[in-house]
Image (tube, rainbow, N blue to C red):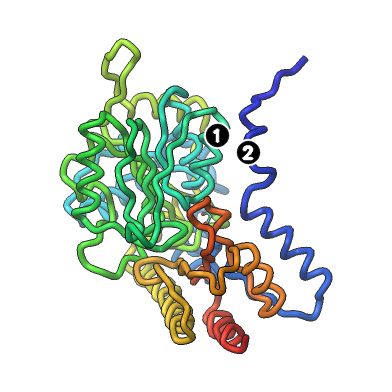
Amino acid sequence: MILINENFLKLQDNYLFSTIAKKVEKYSQENKNNKIIKLGIGDVTRPVVPVVIEAINKATKEIGTKTGFKGYGPEQGYSFLRKAIIENDYKSRNIILKENEIFVSDGAKCDCGNILDIFSEKNTVAITNPVYPVYLDTNIMCGRKIIYLPLTEKNNFIPEFPKEKVDIIYLCFPNNPTGTVLNKKELEKWVQYAKENKAIILYDAAYEAFITEENIPHSIYEIEGAKEVAIEFKSYSKTAGFTGLRCAYIVVPNELMGYTKKGEKISINKLWNRRTCTKFNGVSYIIQRAAEATYSEEGKKQIKENIKYYQKNAKIIKEGLEEIGFVTYGGKNSPYIWLKVPNKMTSWEFFDEMLEKTNIVGTPGSGFGKCGEGYFRLTAFGTIEDSIEAIKRIKKI
Ligand code: MLT
């Protein structure tokens, strides 16, 4: 008799974005003539930029030659990409990292789940509420105790320290789903908290490229001492349009230590490296060359244009909603606009009303957790035409 992991039975039936996709599919089948505007899942719409395509073509040709052929690559990522990451994403911010601290992967979503392999199931986890569902579900799957840190208007969307001791803390800033940020001082407090409590912060910085304001950290390592307590997750998905190409990386500093039951210190980097070598064979050479191209002068320029495009969408959506009396958060340093649902409707009621009356798809706040009830998330990753049209339609109703 095959025994299953019964923790899976504690999960909701479907992953949030699959539930939404199914609902939308059903609606569009029944209303074939309606033009649906999808501002639900944060998937990009701008084509992959020319420098990246050139790099893909070049690398593809290369592996078709005798001298350029590549078999298995290093599990942790090719040196050329790890070096480019260190130079461009960190050294430029006065953060010094070593090559062995960078692990290239096929996505931050997978990394967020996979990292849990190296931590004991006995650890207590703190996640914000609302939260990106992956942090929650992956911890339910392995049966960890979960503590919620509310992100509400009352606390200005700044998580407060948990009342009981926690070991693993997920922080995502700019935040998904609320689009809000932590300033340097606020993040410093969390680093300090982690140090005092021998806890680890899993810092998801997937949206840092959308930061526009000063004094908002782009990396947790801008905070002194953070290398001793934090792993950082980064992704090319939203910044460089890699949602389909798949490439991301995590930083696991050499200073970071975990403990055995007996209290011996163990290098987290070593554990993650061991796990990576056993369970992963690296991202394809072609895609790593593509990621590397994002750091060329031309690459940076082209990507910045795309980010500006999405930032403009965020502004159109946020200002458009506020003009007609909606209360909104986020959208300034983030591609997500978190709006307060009017007339005491629930998030799902508002989702249905938006779909039926305006043919706009967003994400119900309650799908991200209890504290998201009464909110709704729109993304700026649509086209500019759709963002303008969406606001027009909402204004009409
Ligand atoms: C979101 O919409 O929250 C994200 O696109 C989901 C993801 O990155 O996996």
Residue 104 image point, x, y percent: 42, 42
Mark 1 and mark 2: Cα distance apart in space: 7 Å
Q: Amino acid at mark 1?
A: Ile
- Lower position in the chain sequence, tag 1 or tag 2: 2
Residue 289 image point, x, y percent: 44, 52
Residue 96 image point, x, y percent: 19, 45
Number of the label disc, if any, that sits on residue 140: 1
Task: Assess whether mark 2 and mark 1 are in contact (beta carbons under 8 angstroms).
Answer: yes
- Farthest right residue? 30
> Can you tell me whether the CB of the residue at mark 1 lies under 8 Å from the nearest atom of ligand 1?
no
Residue 174 in sight from this viewpoint = yes
* Vertical arrangement, residue 379 with respect to residue 82, above or below: below
Q: Residue at x 67, y 33 (%)?
A: 9
* Vertical arrangement, residue 332 with respect to residue 162, above or below: below
Q: Residue at x 80, y 80 (%)?
A: 33
Q: What element does badge 2 sit on?
A: loop
Residue 299 image point, x, y percent: 38, 66
Question: Along the horizontal axis of the image, is 345 left or right of 171?
Answer: right
Q: Amino acid at mark 2?
A: Leu
Q: What residue is disc 2 on?
A: 11
* Vertical arrangement, residue 270 with respect to residue 205, above or below: above
- Farthest front residue? 344
Quarter-wise, where is residue 327 in the image? bottom left
Q: Residue at x 62, y 70 (%)?
A: 38
Q: Which of these two is toward me, 190 or 33?
A: 190
